[in-house]
Image (cartoon, rainbow, N blue to C red):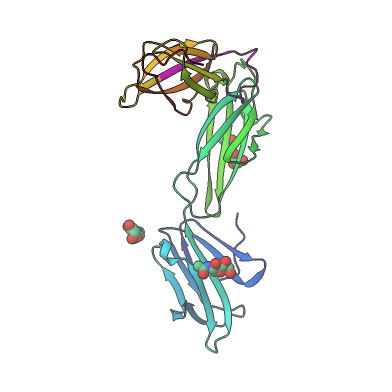
Amino acid sequence: MARVCAVAIAVLLGPVLCRNLPEDPFTKELYVAVGSAVEVPCKGKGGEEGQWGLNGKELHAVLSIRNTTLEDQGNYTCRSRDGSLLQTLFLRPGYPPSRPQVKCWSPSYPKHALCSWGEGPEPLLPTRYTATYETGLRWGHLLQPCLPVPGLRHHCQLNIRMYHQDAHSINVTATNPLGSAYTIFSFMVEDVVKPDPPVDVRVVQDSKAKTLSVTWAPPPSWTTPAFFPLKYMVRYHTGNSKTARKLGPFLSPAMALKGLRGGETYTVQVSAQDRLVGQSSDWSAPVSATVLPRGHAGQR
Ligand SMILES: *[C@@H]1O[C@H](CO)[C@@H](O)[C@H](O)[C@H]1NC(C)=O
Ligand SMILES: *[C@@H]1O[C@H](CO)[C@@H](O)[C@H](O)[C@H]1NC(C)=O
Ligand SMILES: *[C@@H]1O[C@H](CO)[C@@H](O)[C@H](O)[C@H]1NC(C)=O
């Protein structure tokens, strides 16, 4: 529960938090949910009455806002009749956090899973996130922190257990001065295995005519290709065609596109998937190559 400010706040409707700024005893921060009502009389510590002002404009003895909007943000000053400062109110309208939208996937099976969350509508106020997880159904036992991922905002990393019979459950809680909201996301590890896309995709003219040779490398984040081999899909389309053709799965990182048209440019992408479980990666970044006209093939 928030510490109540020393200011006499007559009426507050809706989510509100008031706190003293430690470095400035005359200033209070007042967080107010957009749409709620605020009513604060201008009074000094000893009860002396004064008048509110904002940006040099004089207001009333009671700061009264029926329906707070974002435009009401500002530093309101309360001064006595002789002009001395009794207090400053830093009014900060915003929104309580909404429930984070959580998703989890494992690009480095069977070691870790990553979870990420969206902020939802902009709460406009400093919002802090905490993430904890638990394996198994007895929520509340052995809660572990989901650890921050350096360089990635709104992501965390957790250890997973292969072929665990129970779900992993993560609790992401968003907290700001106006409230908090959490989302529980539960998943079976094998369902969320999802490699990153293959890398180093190369598309070059093959020694055979009308053929492009395509090679790639497994995603570096997939740390155990020897024990958990990947399979790959390849899709390609010509420069002016919207529909892509899909070929695969391929078990090794190379294939040839045959029977192509000389002079035509083809755009190629590759995806990866664990051979037994989980989901396909996103497609790799597109790489284009032009098939040499008849007669030019065979060089190299
Ligand atoms: C508050 O103001 C907003 C925007 O002007 C309006 O949509 C809303 O209906 C108002 N709410 C109340 C309780 O007056
Ligand atoms: C109000 O005052 C605070 C603290 O002194 C300052 O950080 C902030 O920028 C000011 N805000 C406005 C809208 O004037
Ligand atoms: C999720 O975490 C928050 C913050 O730690 C906690 O208040 C809330 O009770 C948790 N939810 C469940 C269902 O345990």
Q: Quadrant of ligand 3?
A: top right
- Name the residue nearer the viewer: 296 or 56: 296
Judged by its main secondary structure, the magenta piece is loop
Placement of 222 over or under 37, stated as above or below:
above
Can residue 280 be seen here? The reply is no
- Report the front residue among 294 and 150: 294
Above or below residue 159? Residue 101 is below
Q: What is the quadrant of the N terminus in the image?
A: bottom right
Q: Quadrant of residue 115?
A: top right
User: Residue extending furthest bottom?
Assistant: 82
In this view, 13 is above or below 197: below
How many circles with numbers are drawn on the protein? Answer: 0
Q: Position of residue 247 (x, y in %)?
A: 42, 13
Is residue 224 shown in magenta?
A: yes
| Span colored in magenta | 219-235
Residue at point 64% right, 38% down?
A: 148
Q: Residue 7: name its quadrant.
A: bottom right
Q: In the shown orientation, is residue 28 left or right of residue 143?
A: left
> Could you tell me which residue is drawn at 56 percent across and 38 percent down?
172
Q: For residue 92, say whether it is visible.
A: yes
Q: Give the percent coordinates (x, y) of residue 255.
A: 48, 12
Residue found at x 41% / y 19%: 235
Quarter of the image where one finds residue 162 = top right
x, y percent for residue 242: 31, 25
| Residue 122 position in % (x across, y down) | 46, 50
Residue under the point 59% across and 66% down: 5
Residue 31 inside the magenta-drawn segment: no
